[in-house]
Amino acid sequence: MREPYRIKVVEPLRRVTREERERLLREAGLNIFAVPAESCAVDLLTDSGTSAMSDRQWAGLMTGDESYACSRNFYRFRDAVRDVFGYPIVIPTHQGRAAEHLLFASVVKPGDVVPSNTHFDTTRANVEHQGAEARDLVVDEGLDPSCLHPFKGNLDPVKLDRAIREVGRERVPLVMLTVTNNSGGGQPVSIANVRAVREVCDRHGVPLFFDACRFAENCWFIREREPGWAKRSIKDIARELFSYGDGCTMSAKKDALVNIGGFVALKDAAWAEKITNLLILFEGFLTYGGLAGRDLEAIAVGLTEVLDEDYLAFRVGQVAALGEQLERAGVPIVKPVGGHAVYVDARAFLPHIPQSQFPGQALVVALYREFGIRAVEIGSLMFGSRDPKTGEPVYPRLELVRLAIPRRVYTNDHLRYVAESVARLFRERDRLRGLRITWEAPTLRHFTARLEELDAAAAPAAR
Ligand code: F0G
């Protein structure tokens, strides 16, 4: 499918030599987060906050009412959120993790357990910041990169029921359901699964919240894959999905097609009061929550544009096409391809690099050095930890490299370059080496860690 838009404004890309990239990587301590964005040929670090806004969104910025309280854009924003999600109370925040912080700080206590399909890194960190445990209970299929299940983001209702019984209802303040399941490969959750999860929640009297970042992409997959939904509009599907929840957090930087923003939306007035007390302390007044009036307007417009079926068909199709090109070249990827990104299975790509030597990050480093493509590791660097009792390293089951596609930014030709580059690296994979951390922060270490490349001699199994 071709782009269902044309280009009105362009941002020139600078040419950068391999030598310059080599130097920038060295200075960055092999951490791709510290590499200047302007030195990337194609930046697939994230699909978050990187969307190109439409002419209507840009026009909306000019209608920003920057009054401190009750600006007109707040009402437009609130009504747009209510219209899609159906929750009456809408609380703006500057981005998704602020929404998570406010929600968890209000309702989670030390010793609690928050089950989810898979917590995103900031969600997990925000739960843990309250002294609670973030527990991932995705279906087993979601942990197998090659299993072709249509809804690998589903939360296993049996595991959930067992977890709530074991822990005790009083220690489970809420269940979070991430749509789509980003850390598990951008995989969708089905309506049937949401109903099943709701049933378990009802049995125990536990509220259900959504992490709604990529809800429109999730609803697109429901329409494509779940029996009974093929003829329904994306908005109808979204309304149905969220009707089973008590509220949601959302980073508007994804499926609201804006560069900044987020919110909590919910039904319960008592929870909302706790959240807004913190909102005023940390983010801003109730009607702007850390955003400008114009930002609220851009979200209101974006929330309608993202439901457009031509947009979604192209969007999800463009990501799928990248996956197909990689698959044809034999590159191991997570299947089926998710909604916002292609995830390369780094352990299968680099079987000669053990997880203790960060194969995912090694692949990220090589992709940038050789081709100027910036990707992100979602594996042992992001999620690796130490067992609190034994001090032994613990590695995540999946070792992935995410090629996240910004919305409405790159053409199919850019993505062909990406596919050809990854395929070339795959043919030359034997020469890639493992890495070692030289410095790390106590939490969310992947953002700031510094690493170095191991000598060929130090890498035990290297060929
Ligand atoms: N939840 C999910 C599922 C996310 O993917 C993200 C962000 C957040 C919450 C937090 O939102 O960034 O606005 O504070 N994901 C980005 C990513 C950063 O690259 O996947 P935020």
Image: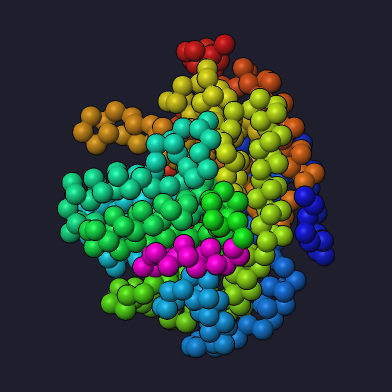
Q: Is 245 covered by the magenta stretch? A: yes
Task: Report whether 375 appears left or right of 204.
Answer: right
Can the viewer see residue 275 in this picture? yes
On screen, residue 92 above or below 410: below
Foreground of the two, 397 or 388: 397
Q: Could you say where residue 220 lies in the image, as x and y percent from the top left? A: 59, 55
Foreground of the two, 86 or 425: 86
Q: Could you say where residue 385 lies in the image, as x and y percent from the top left? A: 35, 36
| Magenta-tinted stretch | 232-248
Image quadrant in which the C terminus is located: top right
Foreground of the two, 285 or 178: 178
Extreme-front residue of the structure: 228
On screen, residue 291 above or below 5: below
Foreground of the two, 28 or 197: 197
Q: Could you say where residue 418 lies in the image, as x and y percent from the top left? A: 72, 38
Q: Could you say where residue 320 lies in the image, as x and y percent from the top left? A: 66, 43
Q: Quadrant of residue 387?
A: top left
Task: Report whether 135 appears left or right of 12.
Answer: left
| Residue shown at the point (76%, 38%) measured from the top left | 417
Q: How are the residues colored?
A: rainbow
Q: Is 453 covered by the magenta stretch? A: no
| Residue shown at the point (32%, 75%) measured from the top left | 268
On screen, residue 124 above or below 252: above
| Residue shown at the point (31%, 51%) measured from the top left | 115
Q: Quadrant of residue 296?
A: bottom right
Can the viewer see residue 447 in this picture? no
Task: Report whether 372 appears left or right of 354.
Answer: right
